[in-house]
Image (cartoon, rainbow, N blue to C red):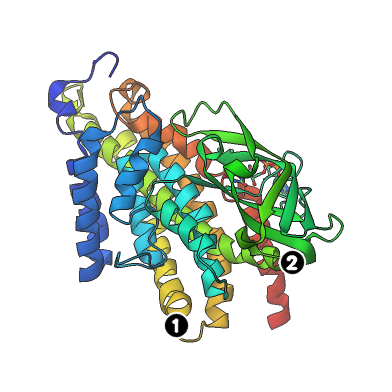
């Protein structure tokens, strides 16, 4: 803290421990015993790590701490870390956002966006040890991963990518550029997409795991709102990728890209839920203790009703995230035969939920700042950092309109039912 102006009695209550008390009161009734025990483990981990976090340092030094506990991701089973599944991943993302929202952003990019394709590779019949080694390095937090989909000229229109893949005797050659590659400047591995034929991206897309040492170059972008996360402009110039690093070839890259988007968007909901609760709970604690005109400011309707409105929305978003994750787990991830009906529903709900939750992170942080007053824009509370990270939530994983576009196309299909 550069300069303290907040009252000591209030400051001592603004603690992660207290955040968890209020979070648990609101969320634990929605969880079963196994899920509560898992959250308790996560909270012990977060309370232990919290005092060791130096906010003047990049988040990456914390990755091995996450890896030791199997917290780089929890959708898939890695080593003996249990429990796992989409609901556990949502709860992981939520807790890590409560702990350190910038760490959570970087963790999601490495553990889920880059890590998930390594699991999909084996579930789709991939063989050999190469990708297993990559997976182990990413999951242990020893190495850093990122995903390269977005290009300078292809943002929302991601499918029509211009990074060109060319077959060689022993693999593939990439030429092209990516942008906004979260973790890119620090990354050891780039899960990146290219196409053999720009005119026919769907049936020629490749998904490959690229080691930095294959020749990837990166330049860091200046993004003020997440200073502890490095985000890159990434260059592939005749980058040679050996065969065993190709995750999906000849158009299968396109299938894998879309297969990945659903769990990724559900996962982003987890990060968002954490930001919502974190901002809101700090606001609740502060406005209960801050007095003006002789009364706690929460007693004034302008403040209290506003927070009541935000609490309602945070609860609604949380219950949506948990319910969609439950359906994903029960009917898709752990089902003997994944339900087509559930797959269709979850694809739609992942867009709806990502759209709603990402926007809510921003609404909650902004409104909480107005309810708290001046202190909330200083570094005396964590709210301003949450506000900054909330700006990113709506852009990553597909911007607002792209989620709405997907939801709209679902609405149009309803005429077929009539
Ligand atoms: C901090 C940050 C981190 C990111 N991390 C990654 C990452 O790790 N890897 C990665 O590959 N990408 C990443 N992204 C990229 C992100 O997914 C894109 O920014 C996003 O897909 C939108 O692309 P764009 O920014 O080029 O906007 P554009 O596609 O240029 O869109 C501009 C505006 O037009 C709207 N728009 C575009 N098309 C339509 C349409 N058909 N209908 C209605 N509206 C439309 C958009 O919603 C937006 O409002 C990141 C972005 C940011 C800012």
Q: Can residue 226 be seen in this view?
A: yes
Measure the C-alpha gap from mark 1 to mark 2.
Answer: 27 Å
Q: Callout 1 environment at 10 Å: few (<14), some (14 to 19), or many (20+)?
A: few
The residue singled out by tag 1 in the image is 335
The residue shown at (74%, 51%) is 173
The residue singled out by tag 2 in the image is 251
Say which of 75 and 124 sits in front: 124
The residue shown at (67%, 52%) is 241
Say which of 385 and 42 sits in front: 42
Residue lying farthest to the top in this orientation: 3
Displayed-image quarter of ligand 1: top right
- Does residue 361 appear to the left or right of 379 in the view shown? right
Q: Reply above or below: 219 against 30.
A: above
Contact (Cβ within 8 Å) of mark 1 with mark 2 = no
Q: Position of residue 279 (x, y in %)?
A: 34, 39
Say which of 227 and 168 sits in front: 168
Distance from mark 1 CB to nearest ligand 1 atom below 8 Å: no
Q: Callout 2 environment at 10 Å: few (<14), some (14 to 19), or many (20+)?
A: some
Residue lying farthest to the left in this orientation: 9
The residue shown at (39%, 31%) is 385
Q: Can residue 369 be seen in this view?
A: no
Q: Position of residue 282 (x, y in %)?
A: 27, 37
Image quadrant in which the N terminus is located: top left
Residue lying farthest to the right in this orientation: 199
């Amino acid at each position: 803290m550069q300069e303290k102006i907040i009252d000591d009695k209030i400051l001592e209550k603004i603690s992660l421990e207290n955040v968890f008390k209020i979070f648990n009161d609101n969320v634990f009734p929605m969880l079963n015993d196994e899920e509560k025990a898992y959250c308790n483990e996560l909270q012990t981990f977060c309370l232990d790590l919290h005092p060791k976090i130096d906010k003047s340092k990049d988040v990456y030094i914390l990755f091995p701490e996450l890896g030791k506990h199997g917290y780089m991701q929890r959708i898939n089973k890695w080593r003996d870390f249990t429990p796992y599944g989409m609901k556990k991943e949502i709860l992981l993302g939520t807790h890590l956002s409560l702990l350190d929202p910038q760490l959570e952003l970087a963790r999601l990019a490495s553990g889920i966006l880059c890590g998930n394709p390594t699991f999909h590779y084996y579930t789709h019949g991939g063989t050999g040890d190469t990708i297993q080694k990559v997976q182990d390095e990413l999951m242990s937090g020893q190495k850093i991963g990122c995903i390269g989909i977005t290009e300078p000229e292809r943002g929302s229109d991601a499918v029509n990518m211009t990074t060109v893949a060319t077959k060689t005797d022993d693999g593939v050659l990439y030429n092209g550029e990516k942008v906004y590659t979260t973790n890119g400047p620090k990354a050891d591995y780039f899960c990146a997409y290219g196409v053999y034929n720009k005119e026919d991206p769907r049936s020629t897309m490749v998904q490959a795991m690229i080691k930095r040492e294959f020749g990837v170059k990166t330049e860091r972008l200046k993004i003020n709102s997440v200073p502890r996360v490095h985000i890159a402009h990434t260059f592939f110039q005749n980058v040679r990728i050996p065969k065993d690093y190709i995750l999906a070839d000849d158009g299968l890259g396109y299938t894998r890209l879309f297969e990945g988007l659903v769990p990724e968007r559900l996962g982003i909901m987890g990060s968002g839920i954490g930001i919502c609760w974190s901002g809101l709970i700090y606001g609740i604690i502060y406005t209960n203790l801050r007095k003006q005109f002789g009364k706690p400011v929460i007693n004034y309707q302008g403040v209290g009703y506003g927070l009541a409105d935000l609490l309602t929305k945070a609860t609604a978003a949380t219950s949506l995230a948990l319910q969609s994750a439950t359906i994903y787990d029960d009917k898709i991830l752990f089902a003997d035969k994944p339900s087509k009906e559930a797959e269709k529903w979850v694809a739609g709900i992942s867009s709806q939920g990502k759209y709603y939750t990402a926007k809510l992170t921003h609404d909650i942080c902004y409104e909480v700042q107005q309810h708290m007053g001046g202190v909330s824009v200083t570094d005396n509370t964590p709210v301003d950092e949450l506000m900054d990270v909330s700006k990113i939530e709506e852009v990553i994983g597909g911007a607002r309109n792209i989620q709405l576009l997907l939801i709209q196309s679902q609405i149009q299909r309803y005429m077929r039912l009539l």
